[in-house]
Amino acid sequence: MNGLLWVLQIALAFLCLGGGNFKIFKIDELQTTVNAMRELPHGLWAFMGAIECLTGLCLIVPGALNLLPRATPIAAAVLAAQSLLISALYLYYKDFAPLPYSLVMAGMAAFIAYGRFVLKPF
C-alpha cells in the first residue's frame, strides 16, 4: 500500500505543479476556452494556483525528508476540497472539458488523504 500511495502522491504532485503554474502564469490562455476563468478574478485563480503548487510540494517533500510527515495527508485533504470547489465552479459555468481533470485530482487526493491518515501513515 505504501508503494501505491507514493506513486499516486508523485503523480498528483506533478499534476498539481503543472496545473498550479498554468493558473498562475497562463491564465490568459485558459480564459479563451474556460468560462469560469473569464468570470472570476485573476487574483482568485492565482491564489488557487499557489495553493495547488504548495499542496503538490507537500505531497512529496515532508514524507521524503521525514519532516512534518503529517503535512502530506493534510495537503491531500486540502487539495481534494479545492478540486471539488473548482469542479463545482466548472459545473456552474458549464465548462465540461476541464471537469474530468478536476474530479480525478479530487479522487486521487481524497484517496491519498485517507491512505496516509488511516491505512499507511508515515
Image (cartoon, rainbow, N blue to C red):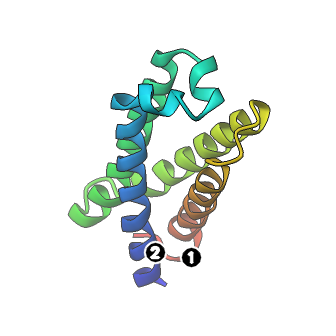
Judged by depth in the image, the label closer to the viewer, 1 or 2, is 2
Counting from the top left corner in percent of width and height, residue 23 is at 43, 33
Counting from the top left corner in percent of width and height, residue 58 is at 35, 51
Q: Classify mark 2: residues with Cα within 10 Å, few (<14), some (14-19) or many (20+).
A: some
Amino acid type assigned to the residue bearing label 1 in the image: Leu
**SS under mark 1:** helix
Q: Can residue 70 be seen?
A: no
Is residue 42 or residue 70 the one in the foreground? Answer: 42
Identify the residue shown where x is 64% and y is 28%: 36
Identify the residue shown where x is 74% and y is 30%: 93
Q: Classify mark 1: residues with Cα within 10 Å, few (<14), some (14-19) or many (20+).
A: some
Counting from the top left corner in percent of width and height, residue 107 is at 63, 61
Q: Where is 97 relative to 12, above or below?
A: above
Is residue 116 or residue 7 the one in the foreground? Answer: 7
Q: Can residue 98 be seen?
A: yes
**SS under mark 2:** helix
Q: Where is 117 relative to 99, above or below?
A: below
Q: Where is 52 relative to 62, above or below?
A: above
- Between the C-alphas of marks 1 and 2, the distance is 10 Å
Q: Does residue 95 appear to the left or right of 120 in the view shown?
A: right
Which residue is denoted by mark 1 in the rendering? 119
Counting from the top left corner in percent of width and height, residue 3 is at 40, 83
Image mark for residue 100: none
Identify the residue shown where x is 38% and y is 33%: 50
- Marks 1 and 2, the one that precedes in the sequence: 2
Question: From the image, which quarter does the C terminus lie in?
Answer: bottom left
Return the residue found at the far left. Answer: 65
Q: Are marks 1 and 2 in contact (CB under 8 Å)?
A: yes
Which residue is denoted by mark 2 in the rendering? 5
Amino acid type assigned to the residue bearing label 2 in the image: Leu
Is residue 97 or residue 84 the one in the foreground? Answer: 97
